[in-house]
Image (cartoon, rainbow, N blue to C red):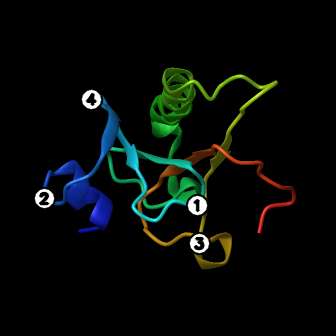
């Protein structure tokens, strides 16, 4: 069982910012920006490359939820604040937990190219 499955099950406390029947979003305990939210599906999909065509609606829901959270936090203004969404895949892609998740980062200038 991954740490994210334990968070979903309520076995590990988290600072939840959004929850619905499909996903959970919470503040990262090791933030890489002033705002660092993780958005995870409640269904276990180990990584984006293992998602199936049947996951299409769920994947869209995750992205729309990220946008909603950004609006709710007031960081969706592209002229002033802005934010970045990141999905890591595999060891060299920066994946540390084998459970698909989206990082929502904001609150500081984010450089390009990323690390």
Looking at the image, residue 23 sits to the left or right of residue 85; the answer is left
* For marks 1 and 2 on the same chain, the one whose residue lies earlier in the sequence: 2
Residue at the disc numbered 2: 11
| Quarter holding residue 89 | bottom right
53 relative to 18 in the view: left or right: right
| Residue that mark 3 sits on | 90
Please name the residue that numbered disc 1 is placed on.
32
Tell which circle, 4 or 1, labels the residue nearer the N-terminal end. Answer: 4
Disc number lying in front (3 or 2): 2
Give the spatial CA distance, label 1 vs label 2. 24 Å
Residue reaching furthest to the bottom: 91
25 shown above or below 4? above
Evaluate if marks 4 and 1 touch, with contact meaning CB atoms under 8 Å apart. no
Q: Nearer the viewer, residue 26 or 81?
A: 81
Quarter holding the C terminus is bottom right
Which residue is tagged 4?
Answer: 21
| Residue 23 visible somewhere in the drawing | no
User: Please, what secondary structure does the residue beneath circle 3 have?
Assistant: loop
Tell me whether circle 1 and circle 2 mark residues in contact (CB < 8 Å).
no
Please tell me which of labels 3 and 1 falls first in the chain. 1
97 sits left or right of 36 in the view: left
Estimate how packed mark 4 is, as few (under 14), some (14 to 19) or many (20 or more) residues with alpha carbons within 10 Å. Answer: few
Q: CA distance from mark 3 to mark 2?
A: 26 Å
The first of marks 4 and 3 along the sequence is 4
Q: Label 2: how many residues lie within 10 Å, few (<14), some (14-19) or many (20+)?
A: few
Residue drawn at point x = 83 percent, y = 55 percent: 111
Query: Would you place residue 30 above or below residue 75 in this image?
Result: below
Instruction: Give the number of the mark in front: 1 or 2.
Output: 1
Residue drawn at x 71%, y 22% is 77
Q: Secondary structure at mark 4?
A: loop
For marks 3 and 2 on the same chain, the one whose residue lies earlier in the sequence: 2
- Left/right placement of residue 42 relative to residue 6 reads right
């Amino acid at each position: 069982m991954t740490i994210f499955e334990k968070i979903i099950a309520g076995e590990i406390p988290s600072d939840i910012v959004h929850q619905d029947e499909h996903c959970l979003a919470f503040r990262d305990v090791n933030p890489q920006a002033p705002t660092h939210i993780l958005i995870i599906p409640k269904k276990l999909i180990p990584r984006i490359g293992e998602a199936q065509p049947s996951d299409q609606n769920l994947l869209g829901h995750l992205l729309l939820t990220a946008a909603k959270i950004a609006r709710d936090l007031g960081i969706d203004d592209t002229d002033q604040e802005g934010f970045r969404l990141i999905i890591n895949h595999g060891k060299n892609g920066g994946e540390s937990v084998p459970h698909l998740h989206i990082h929502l980062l904001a609150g500081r200038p984010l450089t390009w190219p990323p690390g």
